[in-house]
Image: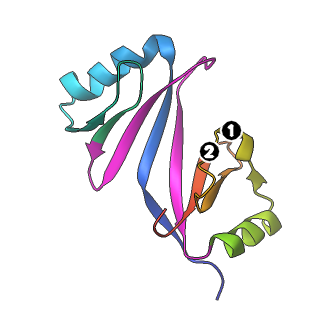
Amino acid sequence: MGVHFSPGHNLAMKVPVHEFEATVAFYRDILHLDEVSVGDRGTSVVFAFGDKRLWIDPAEGMSQAELWLEIMADDVEAAAVELRRAGCVRRDGIEALPEDFNGFWISSPANIIHLVAGAGS
């Protein structure tokens, strides 16, 4: 039947450092989203976004914001094979994942970054 893919629980907005504070203030003070987690100054802030989590991450060297999506796969190894056959580009160098993390990065044809993660990741 093939690999089953489903939306993950996380959306990540990678924001240029010079826009980070204003972006966080927009979601916190204007849209009044609930903060789920706040790191030290200059690190990720996480908001409840319906049944998802919106991570806002400061990103050095970026000139504009990017939205990154999480996709869950019931079999990560089979997903890697299926996505490669479909012509999806692996983007593992985009951001380091923990060594024990069951997943990898790809990009869509429109260059949207997706984290493909296994259940329990």
Instruction: Please name whichever residue, 51 or 57, is drawn nearer the observer in this view of the structure.
Output: 57
From the viewer's perspective, tell me whether residue 104 is left or right of residue 19. Answer: right
- Name the kind of residue labelled 2 in the image: Ile
Residue 103, disc: none
Judge whether 82 appears above or below 45 on screen: below
Question: Is disc 2 in contact with disc 1, using a CB cutoff of under 8 Å?
Answer: yes
Picture coordinates of residue 116 (x, y %)?
59, 59
**Badge 1 local density, few (<14 within 10 Å), some, or many (20+)?**
few
Picture coordinates of residue 73 (x, y %)?
56, 70
**Badge 2 local density, few (<14 within 10 Å), some, or many (20+)?**
many
Q: CA distance from mark 2 to mark 1?
A: 9 Å
- Nearer the camera: disc 2 or disc 1: 1
Judge whether 111 appears above or below 79 on screen: above
Question: Which element carries disc 2, helix, strand or loop?
Answer: strand
Residue 113, disc: 2
Q: Which residue is mark 1?
A: 94
From the viewer's perspective, tell me whether residue 9 is left or right of residue 14. Answer: left
Question: Which element carries disc 1, helix, strand or loop?
Answer: helix
Tell me where residue 20 sits by quadrant.
Answer: top left
The residue that appears at 45% across and 59% down in the rendered structure is: 8
Q: Earlier in the sequence, mark 2 or mark 1?
A: 1
The residue positioned farthest toward the bottom in the image shown: 1
Picture coordinates of residue 21 (x, y %)?
36, 16
The residue that appears at 55% across and 76% down in the rendered structure is: 74
Q: Which residues are magenta?
A: 48-75
Residue 65 lies within the magenta run:
yes
